[in-house]
Image (spheres, rainbow, N blue to C red):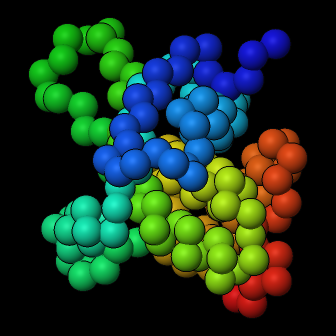
Amino acid sequence: MTKGPTRLDVAIGYAMPRKGLPSAASFRKWAAAALEGRIREADLAIRIVDADEGRALNRHYRDKDYATNVLSFPAELPEGLPEGVHLPLLGDLVICAPVVAREAAEQGKALNAHYAHLTVHGVLHLLGWDHEDDTEAEAMEQLEREILAALGIGDPYAGEAR
């Protein structure tokens, strides 16, 4: 049995050299795991960027002048679609490779495990999950733990104090 939605289209773009970065197949597997049982069809894009592009996007869209690990941009469906027309657009994720690598090293995490966590985290944001308050954060973190455990990846929050 295939995991994930019945139809999943994930476009992966590498805006930097791919050496040392996870494969497109890995990103697709992690996105599918996050969507499992939550959505039937999905189209999304994941772009892996350097620190300059990550910083520019974070500054432009969030008014924060630094590169962050993952940015989520939920799709906005065009107005005026005929009734019954369904577009499975989920949105875009931007993952900043240098930030992910630095965080994984600082936190003593395997690099691929950290990429998996941030992919799952970003996809959940595209689905509407958030962590604006403690209750939302705890619920989202628990869901992330469950999804990652199903992938054989340990608790990404182990050892963190809230």
In screen coordinates, is 112 left or right of 11? Answer: right
Could you say where residue 2 lies in the image, as x and y percent from the top left? Answer: 75, 16
Viewer-nearest residue: 117 or 111? 111
Q: Which residue lies at the image location 43% right of the left edge and 56% below the top edge?
A: 95
Q: Which residue lies at the image location 65% right of the left edge and 83% below the top edge?
A: 106
Q: Which residue lies at the image location 53% right of the left edge and 66% below the top edge?
A: 100
Q: Quadrant of the C terminus?
A: bottom right
In screen coordinates, is 85 left or right of 110? Answer: left
Viewer-nearest residue: 51 or 162? 51
- Residue 71 appearing in the image: no
Could you say where residue 32 lies in the image, as x and y percent from the top left? Answer: 63, 31
Could you say where residue 30 lies in the image, as x and y percent from the top left? Answer: 65, 40
Above or below, comparing residue 82 to residue 13 in the picture? above
Q: How many tags in the picture? A: 0
Residue 109 figure quarter: bottom right
- Residue 89 appearing in the image: yes
Viewer-nearest residue: 126 or 46? 46
Q: Residue furthest left?
A: 80
Residue 23 figure quarter: top right
In screen coordinates, is 134 left or right of 1? Answer: left
Residue 1 figure quarter: top right
Could you say where residue 132 lies in the image, as x and y percent from the top left? Answer: 49, 74
